[in-house]
Amino acid sequence: MTTRQADRPIQFIQLLLKEPNAWFAQIKDEDTWTSLPTLLLITVLCNLAYSMIIGSYCGNAQWYAAPVKIILGSALATLLCYPSLYIFGCLSGADINPGKTLALLVSGMCLTGILLIGFAPVAFVFTFAIQSQFFMGIVHFLAWGISIYFGIRHISLGLGEMSCHNTALIKIWGVILVVTMLQMTVTLRPIIGQSDHLLTSEKRFFIEHWLDNIPKNRL
Amino acid sequence: MDTLIKDLCTNDSRTEKTKKLFLLIVIGGGLYGATLGLWRSPLQALFVAVKFPLLIGLTTLGTGLINTMLAQLMGADISFRRSFLIVARSYALLVIILDSLVPLSLFLLFNLPSMSSEAAVSAHSILLLTNVLLITLAGILANIQLFASLAAVCKTRILALQILLSWLGINMFLGCQLSWNLRPFFGTPSLPVRFLRDHPFENSFYEAVYYTLINLIN
């Protein structure tokens, strides 16, 4: 199947999972602009569905606050890392331009969202069982961690198809993306827990925030 | 029975019949489940006969989607139905192996002190440990078969091993939690016989392990 044949979202999902090389070939041909809206739609819908599961842990305002924060936060973190991906890709020898980089980045984030949907039934079971917000966070980070790993791997494979000969810089970029996204979760907190305010003005580094939230005693 | 086992050990998709696997897991799993609860009481045996296949079914359903996606991403041409059937087949084999050990479990039950005796607590521990050993043995054998099934549809054995490990990790992650939610299985002697504990979905396996460790350290 090629992306030209994949006009429906479900076919696009199959393409990214099973035949990513067909998508990379299309990026190389700079023929991706018609597919980008479909990719963005899948990304938003997948993130919306998974973030509603996150929001269901506390309920109330988090039903809508968590999806909004996660979708906007992911989009912002991705945009923040977009220029560095382009530069790091060029430095690695990849034959890319800003358009190709954007297409690759969006497809990587789309794949991350698709995998999150795969984890949704697992996360759903834990949403009812877990009492501590910290442990709920760990479950979501595990699901997200595996998903983003494959998303970054997809981007790295795509750059490999475009003559990238040095993947070390791409790995560093992957770490930058992960750290940016993790910090975004703390900047936009609370996402899992409940609060009187939709956003918190206190500035904190994500590791410091996590260490402070490790439960010391049974609830 | 030998035809059935050969079918389960064959990597031919034509032998995979969803209904047959489903029935095997329900009936076979129910039989082994009953032996788990029999020491506590006949009612507990009935409850576990329902819960054991339920645990297998819920774990398979809950992890089916992500298992398929990961297998496809790693490069295996496996559809959702195929991955579901491969996992269900390995569970069916697990159930058959466990069922073959039912006579031994019953012999153990016959030799254990009864629920009303003073040694009930130690009897409960022996029952628990023995069945953990039996399930581990059956699990290893079933996973060897799962690996063979994956190797038949993957390009390389390394890829099959990678997929097996990822599936194992995810199935164990959800399976531990679901077994925690669906307890009791063996039936603690000091607690009344019930289908589920009070508030079965208000706690998690991993929190319990964490707090137990914290208590030990403190």
Image (spheres, helix red, strand yellow):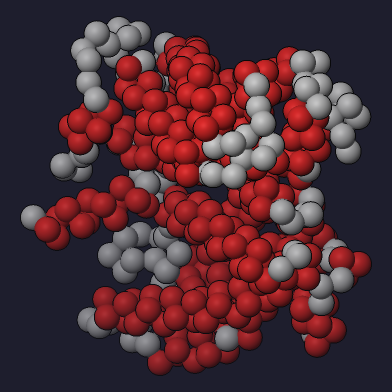
In the displayed structure, B6 sits above or below B199; it is below
In the rendered image, residue A41, in percent from the top left (x then y), is placed at 69, 17
In the rendered image, residue B211, in percent from the top left (x then y), is placed at 22, 51
In the rendered image, residue A108, in percent from the top left (x then y), is placed at 61, 32
In the displayed structure, A213 sits above or below B155; it is above
Q: Is residue A3 visible?
A: yes
Left or right for B172, reference B144? left
Q: Quadrant of residue B143?
A: bottom right
Give the residue drawn at x 81%, y 21%. A31
Left or right for B64, reference A21? left
Give the residue drawn at x 74%, y 40%. A20
Identify which residue, B100 or B121, lies in the foreground.
Answer: B100
Q: Is residue A144 visible?
A: no
Identify which residue, B217 or A210, lies in the foreground.
Answer: A210
Left or right for B6, reference B104? right
Identify which residue, A83 or B148, lies in the foreground.
Answer: A83
Give the residue drawn at x 78%, y 70%. B152
Identify which residue, B133 or B116, lies in the foreground.
Answer: B133
Left or right for B217, reference A124? left
In the displayed structure, B196 sits above or below A116; it is below
In the displayed structure, A193 sits above or below B93; it is above
Q: Quadrant of residue A65?
A: top left
